[in-house]
Each structure stands twice: as structure tokens, then as C-alpha cells.
Amino acid sequence: KEKDLKKKLEEQVRLSQKLQSEIQKIIAAEEEARRKERALALKEKKEKKSKADKIKEAKNKLYADNKKEQPDDSDNEDDVKDTNEKGRKTDVFDMTPEEKITSNSFGNNKGKLPWPTEHGLITGTFGEHEHPILRGIMIRNDGIDISTAEGESVRAIFHGVVSKVMKIPGHNHVVIIRHGNFLSVYSNLSQAYVKSGDKVTSKQSIGKVFTDADEDNKTTLHFEIWKDNNKLNPSSWLTPKSN
């Protein structure tokens, strides 16, 4: 029995690492897309400035040829200077104004966010713990596990945009939602009702929890919260259960 438990634990660790790897890939891909978007915007600003400089040079030459007073382009120079300064101050990974509002709002709701399932109990807590049966063996949970009833719906904990919907062996369907620089991760879904790019609202149904007929109809949602590249304890963010 101990041998079987160790083998099962090894498989769980492998599947968990696979999920974490996929989340990291999504974060990296989004950062790369943002980097390219920012580089393109900077290129367009430079081209705009170059065009403005050429127009100004042509104007100055025309006025010089006609021995007329040169135009006052101080306002234009200020605009270009302001644009350049903004370009220097803006970091590649800065959020959009809308993302900043969402991120701040998410952060301000710590301890008050709705549960990802309407019913259920936390049966797997966040962090590193000793295995309940295998003495001396430590296990790590990068989120929490919520055991619930068969057919239970999965809900978005906050408004945001779906970053990715994918299927991972051992985790079934996985939905990742971005809330500014926060991510909420919902895995072990039998089906997903949303797709990448969809905007979702708080408590919107995004899928259904998978029921494992081979494990006594066990129905468990694995749920994680990330801020940038850091994994957070979801229990600290959800509203406390009254019962």
C-alpha cells in the first residue's frame, strides 16, 4: 500500500509541475506580447517625431529663404519632449489604465472575494505539509483543493479576461483568468463554458467540476491565485465561510 501511495504521489507531483509550467508559459507569452506591443508603439512615436522634425526643417528653410520670421514651434517641441519623456518612463510591462483599475480593485478585495464554487469545503490547503499517511514525506500544494458535489458549477471570483483555456492530462480542463496583474486558475473541470479572450464578471459560471468515477465520484476543484510570478494562498483572498 505504501508503494502504491508513493507512486500516486509521484504522479501528482508530476501533474502539478506540468500545470505550473503551463501557467509560467502563459505569463511569459503575455509579457512577450506586451513587449512587442510597447516596442511597436515606441516605433510609431519615433516615426511621428521624425516626420514632425522634417516638416519643421522644411518650414524653417522656407522662412529663411523668404527672410521671414521663423514660426514659434515651442508648443510642438514641448509635445515631442513630453512624448519622449513618457516613452522613457513607461516600462514595457506596465499595465493599461483599465488593467491597473482592475488590479487595484482585486487587491482591495482581499478576504472578500466569492468562492469559485457556491458549495464545498477546502480539503487541500496551500503550502508545504507532511503527507497524512507517508511519514517523513512532504507534499506541496500551490493552491487549494475544494471538494464539492457532483455537477457543481465553477465561478469566476472577479471580473477579468480569460487568458487561456486548455486541457492538461490529470487536470482535465483548466481556465486561467487575468485580473490586471493577478491570475485566478481553475483546474479539474469536466468542461469549460468560456474561451480565451472572453470578458467575464464576478460569479459568472465558467465551467463544471470534474467528477472522477474511478475515485468514488470524487469532485474536487483545484484553485490557485497568482500575482505576477508569485503564488498566493487563495484562502486569504476568499470570503470566510459562515458555516
Image: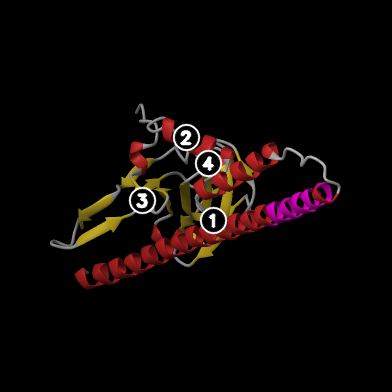
Q: Is residue 165 above or below residue 73?
A: below
Near mark 1 (Cα within 10 A), the count class, few <14, some 14-19 or many ≥20, is some
Q: CA distance from mark 2 to mark 4?
A: 21 Å
Number of the front mark, 1 or 4 = 4
Give the percent coordinates (x, y) of residue 91: 50, 50
Near mark 2 (Cα within 10 A), the count class, few <14, some 14-19 or many ≥20, is some
Q: Which sits earlier in the primary sequence, circle 2 or circle 3?
A: 2
**SS at mark 2 in the image:** helix
Say whether residue 127 is magenta.
no
Near mark 3 (Cα within 10 A), the count class, few <14, some 14-19 or many ≥20, is some
Q: Which residue in the structure is indicated by mark 2?
A: 104
Nearer the observer, 53 or 34: 53
In the image, taking residue 162 as reference, residue 74 lies left or right, namely: right
Contact between labelled residues 2 and 1, with CB atoms less than 8 Å apart? no
Circle 2: residue type: Asn
Contact between labelled residues 1 and 3, with CB atoms less than 8 Å apart? no
Magenta span covers which residues? 47-63
Give the percent coordinates (x, y) of residue 200: 60, 41
Give the percent coordinates (x, y) of residue 232: 35, 46
Circle 3: residue type: Lys
Q: Which residue in the structure is indicated by mark 4?
A: 155
Residue 118 visible in the picture: no
Q: Which residue in the structure is indicated by mark 1?
A: 190
The image's mark for residue 219 is none
Contact between labelled residues 3 and 4, with CB atoms less than 8 Å apart? no
Number of the front mark, 4 or 3 = 3
Please report the residue visible at 47 percent of the width from the left and 40 percent of the height from the top: 117
The image's mark for residue 231 is 3
Contact between labelled residues 3 and 2, with CB atoms less than 8 Å apart? no
Number of the front mark, 2 or 4 = 2
